[in-house]
């Protein structure tokens, strides 16, 4: 009986080990050996793709956008960065995260302006995409068709919890989607909602900690 139990134990451990190795090989093959950062590195092929970083306020969207763009700049790639004219919270000429990281950007009013400004660019960064007109979707698609790597950041929902602007469509057409979380100021849970703390009822009311907080679903309400 003891001999049979030993055989069973050895076979079970061997099977478990083989199962783990199969999973690791699958993961490495699927994600090109990158098991933490699943966003692709720039490659020399003439093909483009779309990456979207989207979540609530204070979740680190712009911070992540800046991180990816800086890596590209260090690699001596030609990077062009755009922001909507309406966003002047921290700077009129830079994209700026709530943690005060910044990169110079081109300020535009209409999304169609982007096309004429990126002919020599390898990578295009677009911040606060929810504030752009609906044509931003066509612009982003055209850029990807041109062989550009397009990285878009923006709010997924407004203060009511309603999908914001063209972000739902951008999320749907992207090859790579990142949904960072903030921290709820009430309970410390992962936060996915943007809580407005003023009396304004307008969908677009640009602000930062003076007007908004990050909340979990339980502690979010519509003012």
Image (spheres, grey):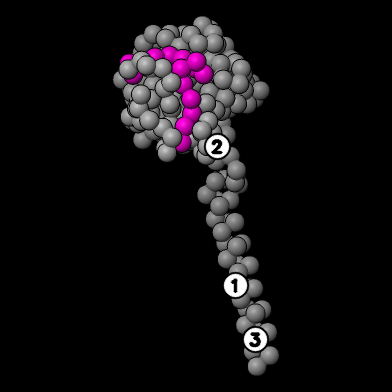
Alpha carbon separation for disc pair 3 and 2: 48 Å
On the rendered structure, is 174 left or right of 27? left
Split into 4 quadrants, where in the image is the C terminus? top left
Q: Quadrant of residue 20?
A: bottom right
Name the residue beneath numbered marker 3.
5
Q: Secondary structure at mark 1?
A: helix
On the rendered structure, is 170 left or right of 81? left
Q: Nearer the viewer, mark 1 or mark 2?
A: 2
**Residue found at the far bottom of this picture:** 1
Residue 82 location (% of width, % of height): 48, 14
Name the residue beneath numbered marker 2.
188
- Residue 200 in the magenta stretch? The answer is no
Q: Residues within 10 Å of mark 3 (few under 14, many from 20)?
A: few
N-terminal-most mark, 3 or 1: 3
Residue plotted at (51% across, 6% down): 92
Residue 212 location (% of width, % of height): 46, 21
Q: Specify the segment rendered in magenta.
A: 202-216
Give the label on residue 15, or none: 1
Q: Mark 3 near mark 1, Cβ–Cβ under 8 Å?
A: no
- Give above or below for 89 relative to 172: above
- Which of the two residues, 151 or 209, is positioned nearer the viewer here? 209
Q: Secondary structure at mark 2?
A: loop
């Amino acid at each position: 009986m003891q001999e049979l139990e030993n055989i069973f134990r050895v076979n079970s451990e061997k099977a478990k080990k083989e199962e783990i190795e199969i999973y690791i090989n699958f993961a490495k093959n699927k994600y090109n050996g990158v098991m933490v950062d699943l966003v692709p590195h720039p490659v020399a092929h003439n093909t483009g793709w779309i990456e979207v970083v989207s979540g609530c306020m204070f979740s680190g969207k712009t911070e992540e956008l800046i991180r990816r763009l800086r890596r590209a700049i260090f690699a001596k790639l030609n990077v062009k960065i755009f922001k909507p004219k309406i966003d002047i919270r921290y700077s009129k000429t830079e994209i700026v995260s709530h943690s005060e990281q910044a990169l110079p950007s081109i300020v535009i009013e209409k999304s169609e302006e982007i096309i004429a400004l990126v002919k020599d660019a390898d990578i295009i960064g677009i911040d606060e995409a929810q504030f752009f007109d609906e044509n931003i979707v066509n612009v982003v698609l055209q850029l990807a068709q041109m062989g550009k790597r397009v990285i878009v950041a923006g709010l997924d929902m407004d203060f009511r919890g309603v999908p914001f602007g063209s972000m739902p469509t951008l999320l749907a057409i992207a090859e790579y989607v990142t949904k960072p979380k903030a921290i709820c100021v009430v309970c410390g849970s992962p936060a996915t909602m943007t809580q407005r703390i003023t009396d304004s009822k307008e969908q677009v009311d640009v602000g930062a900690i003076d007007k908004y907080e990050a909340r979990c679903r339980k502690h979010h309400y519509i003012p």
